[in-house]
């Protein structure tokens, strides 16, 4: 049984191929067109497919997926393995729903704080009663780096470099230290704040940069860059 899981994010379009709960591979999708999806489907030949999208994608993509597979669009009508105890559950991003579903799948009956590192940093708390209580959203790494260029007169756009000093010695290292180390300290601080209210909870870190940030955090965490795919697979199985 092959399942194709799509993650259409603000920065990248990605997909992963599952076979019986195991990820075979993941790739970046160069373009989100019905033609590109059709070609991919002919190659993979999935039994099921699921799409998480936080962008305005071409609706014909959904039609194409439905023709060639048992398709599910992740949205506010999706059956989830948790309840959303927030004022407007329909506004929760599909990506946040997916990584929260993964937390419930792997750590059921426990408090879970899932930190997603993408275009934004999202903090997603699911209690041991499997209730999504909400969390927080702050700018992600690329957004912070770009904002320094866009909202100042002379600062350049700096690429992320994980080999940075604590005390920057030029503009580039000052920015990388400030942004990357600043994010790490922010994440640790948020985890500490949750610790004051909740005892004994898991912290899951996900997103492409999660292995790098995991090394910078003082708190114990579970780092899994593929968590969103695992959540999408779980939701697909839950709805089919």
Image: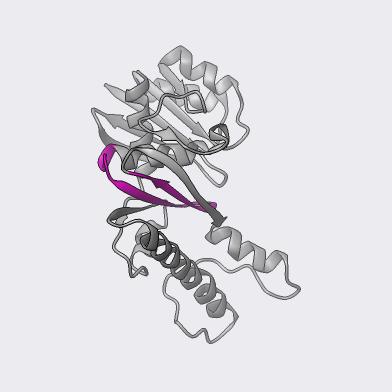
Q: State the residue at coordinates (45%, 77%).
A: 164
Q: Position of residue 212 (x, y in %)?
A: 37, 63
Whether residue 92 is visible here, answered yes or no, is yes
Q: Is 39 a magenta residue?
A: no
Q: Position of residue 125 (x, y in %)?
A: 41, 48
Q: Quadrant of the N terminus?
A: top left
Q: State the residue at coordinates (51%, 39%).
A: 86
Q: State the residue at coordinates (53%, 61%).
A: 141
Please, which residue is most extreme toward the top here? Answer: 67
Q: Position of residue 154 (x, y in %)?
A: 72, 76
Q: Is 117 a magenta residue?
A: yes
Q: Quadrant of the C terminus?
A: top left
Along the line of sight, the residue nearer the viewer: 37 or 240: 240
Q: Position of residue 133 (x, y in %)?
A: 45, 43
Quarter holding residue 19 = top left
Quarter holding residue 187 = bottom left
State whether residue 111 is above or below residue 209: above
Quarter holding residue 24 = top left
Whether residue 45 is visible here, answered yes or no, is no
State whether residue 239 is above or below residue 204: above
Q: Of helix, strand and loop, which mostly describes the magenta segment?
A: strand
Please state the extent of the stretch shown in magenta in the rendering.
Answer: 105-127
Along the line of sight, the residue nearer the viewer: 45 or 93: 93
Q: How many marks?
A: 0
Please, which residue is most extreme toward the front here? Answer: 197
Along the line of sight, the residue nearer the viewer: 94 or 60: 94
State whether residue 95 is above or below residue 172: above
């Amino acid at each position: 049984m092959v399942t194709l899981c799509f993650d259409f994010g603000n920065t990248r379009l990605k997909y992963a191929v599952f076979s019986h709960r195991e990820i075979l591979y993941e790739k970046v999708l160069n373009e989100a067109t019905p033609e590109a999806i059709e070609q991919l489907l002919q190659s993979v030949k999935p039994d099921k497919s699921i799409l998480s999208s936080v962008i305005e994608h071409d609706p014909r993509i959904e039609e194409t997926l439905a023709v060639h597979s048992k398709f599910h669009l992740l949205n506010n009508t999706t059956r989830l393995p948790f309840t959303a105890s927030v004022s407007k559950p329909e506004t929760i991003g599909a990506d946040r729903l997916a990584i929260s579903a993964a937390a419930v799948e792997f750590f059921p009956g426990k408090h879970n704080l899932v930190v997603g590192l993408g275009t934004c940093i999202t903090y997603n708390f699911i209690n041991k009663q499997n209730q999504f209580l909400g969390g927080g959203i702050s700018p992600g790494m690329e957004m912070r780096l770009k904002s320094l260029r866009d909202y100042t007169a002379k600062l350049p756009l700096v690429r992320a470099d994980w080999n940075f000093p604590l005390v920057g010695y030029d503009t580039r290292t000052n920015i990388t230290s400030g942004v990357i180390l600043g994010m790490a300290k922010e994440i640790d601080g948020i985890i500490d704040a949750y610790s004051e209210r909740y005892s004994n909870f898991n912290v899951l870190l996900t997103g492409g940069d999660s292995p790098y940030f995991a090394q910078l955090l003082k708190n114990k965490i579970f780092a899994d860059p593929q968590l969103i795919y695992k959540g999408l697979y779980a939701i697909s199985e839950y709805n089919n």
